[in-house]
Amino acid sequence: MQPDALPAGRLGATKALVDHRIYTIALRKMPEFLEVFDRLAMPILLSTLGAPLGFWVSQVGPQNQFVHLWGYDSLADYEARCLARDSHPDFPAYLGASGHLITAQETRLIRRVALPSIQGWT
């Protein structure tokens, strides 16, 4: 089954690695950040990283956090696509426009674990 054909919530099920990113956004700047991210980063990310697994903003716990997940087939896949993103000629424009909006960034590369109890779960 192709990843885009999987039911909602299962899009990352076929990916060996997930890039789990948390950006902490300056107080009262989330709307501006989301606009800049969508306008300047997303065209680059879609063309270099492919389709994301999803986007979220924090509701409880640490506030002003934007979370996004991207799936990869292997460490080599992750490295190649990140290099393509980082070397994209339009990427510096996004970095310049968003730098004052992001106060912290966490990047985790996490791997999928198969549990027998959820085999076939949708």
Image (spheres, rainbow, N blue to C red):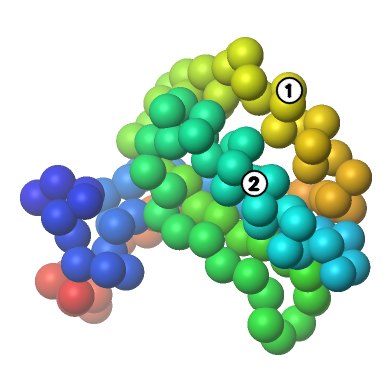
Look at the image and tell me whether residue 114 can be seen: yes
Ranked by sequence position, the earlier of labels 2 and 1 is 2
Rendered position, 36 above or below 121: above
- Could you classify mark 2 by the number of other residues whose Cα lies within 10 Å: few (under 14), some (14-19), or many (20 or more)? some
Identify which amino acid the numbered label 1 is placed on. Answer: Pro
Q: Secondary structure at mark 2?
A: helix
Residue that appears at 22% across and 49% down: 3
Numbered label attached to residue 119: none
Identify which amino acid the numbered label 2 is placed on. Answer: Phe
Image coordinates of residue 94 in percent, x first then y, are 71, 33
- Could you classify mark 1 by the number of other residues whose Cα lies within 10 Å: few (under 14), some (14-19), or many (20 or more)? some
Residue that appears at 69% across and 46% down: 36
Rendered position, 61 above or below 103: below
Residue that appears at 41% across and 54% down: 53
Numbered label attached to residue 37: 2
Rendered position, 111 above or below 57: above
Q: Secondary structure at mark 1?
A: helix
Numbered label attached to residue 92: 1
Residue that appears at 59% across and 42% down: 39
